[in-house]
Amino acid sequence: MLPVDLYKAAQVRELDRLAIQERGIPGYTLMNRAGETAFSILREHWPQAQRVVVVCGSGNNAGDGYVVARLARQAGLEARVLYLKDPGELKGDALTAFQAARATDVPVEGFSAASLGVAEVIVDALFGTGLDREVGGRWRAAIEAMNTQSVPILAIDIPSGLHADTGAVLGVAVRAAVTVTFIALKQGLFTGQGPDRCGMIRFSDLGVPAAIYAAVAPASRRYTGDDLPRLLPKRPRSAHKGDHGHVLVVGGDQGMGGAARMAAEATARCGAGLVSIATRASHAGLQAAARPELMFHGIESAAELPSLLDRATVVAIGPGLGRADWGQALLETVLTSDRPLVVDADALNLLAAQPVRRGNWILTPHPGEAARLLDTTTAQVQADRFQAVTELVKRFGGVGVLKGAGSLVASEDGALSVCNTGNPGMASGGMGDVLTGVIAGLLAQGMALDEAARAGVYIHGWAGDLAAKEGERGLLAMDLLPFLHTLVNPADHG
């Protein structure tokens, strides 16, 4: 089991310092433990491999690599090191590790792409967590050569080229099959391009005392759904629909009625007692026939909306809303209400043009929508997703959800959560509409804003993972609905 606490690189360096200077664990002892763990994981994942090539850079990450090479050699494997930093220029523990490797006759030579060809497993020990600039020159060429090999890569601590704090690729990054990381989990491994580059993540605290972690507060946390049984308890036998909230979904301009319906169906499947939809009149009749449990209202004027708002517990606005006058007028009317809101899609795009701050809403942008809200570019949002979602909440209030690989949830109290359910098959139309409905349905049942956002993102991604058991390609948003019904009843399914 991986820990839930996530840290920035500077925080991990401080934990490392505390272990060495205040707890008296020699740095070389920690390096040997790291190398031993990495080698053990290498043997666990690739027990038949006999030829190991370790690619070393500089600093302690290289030292870990030299330890792996020594252990592989001692275990009777054919191990060699390819270096990009002259080992004679190494210092401290890394130099000691190099000397120990040479003492066991590990072949050490300058890097060449051709020398990678003998490997059955490549060990990436080029860069550690301190990298904060774009990779270039021969270092970039080395990573590109590693990535072109047809053999698996084991990354030590972090795939080289990946930013430990943000999960952004710094020009180029190793694409690892397995990453073994030490002391504490780095938050960049779990969002942005981190999940794609890390492969399976393995962790070891290297035996440092648990007490040192109390001195450094984590930067963020992984949300693992452990509180779902508390948030979604078994309902009392006396329950009735009025106990579970009334969600009003506002959206579905001409030609986009399906978006509002998908959000509404997800809301209902997640347990809201009543679900209404304010949509174009041309959609209402047909949609009601297809899903009679939902209450469709043909709305052609914003003046027709207040009576529906008065009856709602929660309002979800945005799916299929459009950016024309109709959608703009409905959003302006919804914003006069004091109801908690879930805001997505074109409602976010309209909000970007006329910003409003509010405390009782959840904003759920994808990176492009977040860029418009923050008046920046999608690339800048993705370059530091943690900063982007934090700034989103700072400007607009409430709770922010930044969707994507490793979706992030931020609240005004500074809490940051990372959710790693979900898969690439969910990159298809309508998935965001379903998420809007999931969050609104949970919010209507009494969850706090941050609880509904975290649980909603987690359950939505989990349903996507279950729906993708037969394959990710071709996954549709509505495929999630049966699994949502199961996952919001944890007391019935263990």
Image (tube, rainbow, N blue to C red):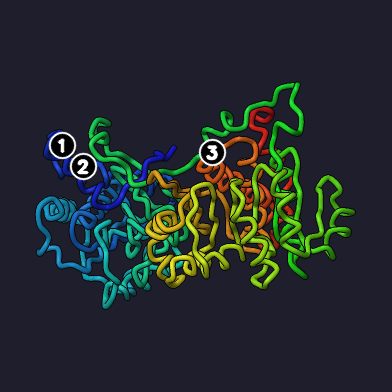
Which residue in the protein does label 3 denote?
Answer: 448
Residue that appears at 16% across and 55% down: 98
Label 3 amino acid? Answer: Ala
Who comes first in sequence, dot 1 or dot 2? 1
**Residue 6: x %, y % from top left:** 36, 45
Residue that appears at 47% across and 60% down: 196
**Residue 256: x %, y % from top left:** 74, 66
Which residue in the protein does label 1 denote?
Answer: 25
Label 1 amino acid? Answer: Ile
Neighbours of disc 1 within 10 Å: few (<14), some (14-19), many (20+): some
Q: Secondary structure at mark 3?
A: loop
Q: Secondary structure at mark 2?
A: helix
Label 2 amino acid? Answer: Leu
Query: 222 or 174, which lies in front?
Result: 222
Q: Which mark is residue 30?
A: 2
Of circles 2 and 3, which is in front? 3
Label pair 1/2, CB-CB below 8 angstroms: yes
**Quarter that holds the N terminus:** top left
Question: Would you say 216 lies left or right of 492 here?
Answer: left
**Quarter that holds the C terminus:** top right
Question: Outermost residue, front direction?
Answer: 303
Query: 149 or 222, which lies in front?
Result: 222
Quarter of image, res 487:
top right
